Image (cartoon, rainbow, N blue to C red):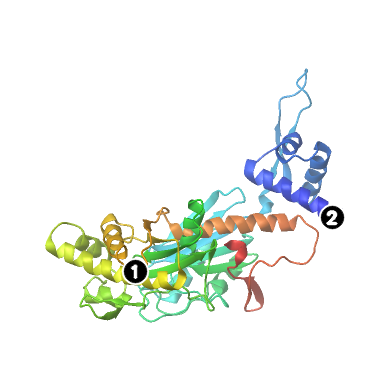
Amino acid sequence: MDLARSMTDETVLRALMQHRRLTRAELAAHTGISKPTAGESVRRLSAAGLLADTGERTPGGRGKGRVGSYYALTPDAGTALAVSIGPSGAVAEQVDAYGDTVARARRPLRTPTEPEAVAAALHELTALAGPLPRLAVVSAADPVDRRTGRLRKMPDAPFLLGDLDPVAVLSPYVAGPITVDNDVNWAARAERDATEGRTDFAYLHLGVGLGGAVVSDGEVRRGHGGLAGELAHLVTTGPNGDATGFIQVFGELGLRLPGSTAIDTARLLAAVTGDDPDASATRSLIARAVAGVVAAVVALTDPAEVILGGSWGPHPAILDAVSAVVARQPRPVPLHAATVTAEPSLTGARTDAITRLRTAIITASQPPGPAADAGPLSQAGDRWVRLAGPAGA
């Protein structure tokens, strides 16, 4: 009986998350459950504080049938926090179970930056977020240790100069679990969700920094420590034809920001566009270096296609030049520009936050029982938090 009630309550909640407000008769029609069963579920969920009568009524009386009351999720059902940390700044969005962004704030960050500056920006953002969210999902432009959720310092890091613990920073502002993953992994999830049937691909982020993600059978493969796809130091063909680390190529071409390993994207695009010999030569050198990375990724992960994202990767001049080189390789693979171009990492994190929020609301409606396996646990201080796992993929 408890199982049947739990399944009915989940069905009712999901219907209301999709349609926002429904009468008991409409719930029965949309879900296929009987009107009495729908009414009992509404009563239980209202008693649990998850549903409420909106005060709106259907037309009724005088031969039009009974007046129906509209029900919807209560504000107490909760919200989730989606956070993006990257060279373009720190952004926090509070989202509800309908998928709406109810609050958004942004704080600029310089490149490169210090962990203390990022932590201060996050404190400011979360203080403005409103009611305590049930959970948070964080996208960060740095490698993420999947055991701890900490951002890991890597050689030649173009953005964050040091380690940062987003879980510790955000814990005072979030009631429940905090999920942390690398920004390119979130962008790859957004790309997967945006294109039907796209379940096996490699995603190359070519922007201020360099990164990659591997999606296989619809899941992002994060590696033993969470460092899968960190391709900045992958050896490729340098400007002089010798073996060179990928990130070093742009230093040798003079395309880095002063005093940083970050790529000067504006200068790069200016250098590769046009029909003059210099633009053609620079375009060829960069295409050869990127194609070398593609060859290595294809050899190790066997993707159906490779997606180029970031601020300069999808540019037609780059995409066409890289595609021409890849087509001549022993194992050619189709290359496509990313389809999600507006805040792809935040888009992926936001979608995951909404999914996890809906699951949390449904879980709150059910009797206590063994917790579902939602991914690996990590300890942060005296709190246990779930890091990215299958539930968010």
Pick out the residue farthest to the left: 277
Q: Is residue 293 left or right of residue 166?
A: left
* Percent of width and height locating residue 157: 37, 77
Which residue of the protein is positioned furthest toward the front in this rendering?
330
Q: Residue at x 44, y 80 (%)?
A: 153
Using the rendered view, name the quadrant where residue 389 is placed. bottom right
Q: Residue at x 48, y 72 (%)?
A: 119
Q: Is residue 30 above or below residue 46?
A: above
Residue in front for this viewpoint, 355 or 112: 355
Q: Amino acid at mark 2?
A: Asp
Q: Is residue 190 above or below residue 169?
A: above
Give me the disc on residue 2: 2
Task: Give the quarter of the figure containing the C terminus.
Answer: bottom right
Q: Which mark is residue 356?
A: none
Q: Nearer the viewer, residue 80 or 152?
A: 152
Q: Which residue is mark 1?
A: 330
Q: Nearer the viewer, residue 282 or 154?
A: 282
Q: Residue furthest top?
A: 62
Q: Position of residue 371 (x, y in %)?
A: 74, 66
